[in-house]
Image (cartoon, rainbow, N blue to C red):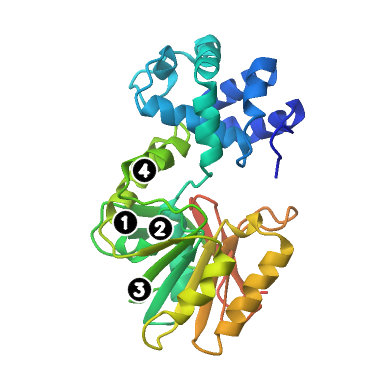
Amino acid sequence: MTAAGSVDREYLLSWLEIARDSPLYFELIGGVVDSPELLSVLRRIHSQPPPNVFLGAIHYLLMKGADSPLRGFYPSIVDDPQPIAGVAEPFREFVLAHEDQIVDIANSRLTQTNESRRCVALLPAVMAAQLGRFHLIDLGTSAGLNLAMDRYRYDWDGLKWGPESPVDLATEVRGDRPQLHNIEILSRTGLDLNVLRPGNPDDRLWLDALIWPEQHERRHRLRAAMAVATQVEVELIEGDVLDLLSGVLRGLPGDEPAIIVNSFILNQFEAAQRESLVDLIDEERAKRRIFRVSLEILQIEDPLPRLEIGEEPTLVQLGTAHHHGEWIDLRYGAGS
């Protein structure tokens, strides 16, 4: 984590390695590195990671209709963007003219890039519980797109599953092919510190703005998934997972099992909070059968997202997956 005011040249140079997938953002943050006035704006942002919400806030304002020559450089906004080499001055002028707006938006929002294609890994892991009917709970749910996982159409290298859907999720299969069966999700509950509503135009726009300008496929998928999510009955609850989860589990109707999913949120938990989550779920297992699915990167030395499952406090590894679902590598029976 990077505290507000602590963003420096070295941090930004490190962040630029991540930004190579976006030529525009690479150029923009490269310009911030050598500009004391732009760096001072970025240092006012305390949301994490600061460059992401900074760029997201700028993108958000432009997508909302802010009148500026900077719009002409964004392939997400115009069909024929201007050459990136000329972006420096329009960018500087826009940031300085809208500084307070940018900082206010960035500090009132979180980085919540819903990527429905992660479900190509999450759904096979959910099915590994061998449950036909269950309640589904998503931790760090953002706009709740994972809760609609059974409403998407999947293609695992030719192995297809799911209804007709505007959301087509295709991925490369490494290792074992998914073992699939029919499921019935009895209820869908999402918990998040900052719930986003897929039916809320402003929330949709923020999620859209967080996708980098050149990532057209991800943007199309996000918009399609949000449209599906608005047709699914879900309960989205805002607050701390550790404060809410016990009450949610105890409030589920009937005695059918629950599956709890978390993906790319535990890195935001302190070690003690992770332990508290495990203890909390284990205590609730005395009242209801609970299965867990986890897709996380928690170890620097293990940079691949680990897909883990389990009905006990200790989860076992089912495989690994790309963080945006470009590939999955399942290894049934090889968990450790």
Report the amino acid beneath label 2.
Gly
Q: Quadrant of the N terminus?
A: top right
Residue at mark 1: 229
Mark sitting on residue 144: 2
Nearer to me, 317 or 146 = 146
Residue 157 as seen in the image, left or right of residue 280? left
Distance, label 2 to label 4, CA atoms, is 12 Å
Image position of 19 with respect to 34: above or below:
below
The residues tagged by marks 4 and 1 sit, at their Cα atoms, a distance apart of: 11 Å
Report x, y in % for residue 52. Answer: 56, 36
Q: Where does residue 223 sit, x and y in percent of width and height? A: 33, 44
| Residue assigned mark 3 | 187
Identified at 61% across, 42% down, the residue is 48
State the SS at label 4: helix
Q: Amino acid at mark 1?
A: Ala
Q: Is residue 44 above or below residue 248?
A: above
Are dots 4 and 1 in contact, CB under 8 Å?
Answer: no
Badge 3 or badge 2: first in the primary sequence: 2
What amino acid type is highlighted by mark number 3?
Ser
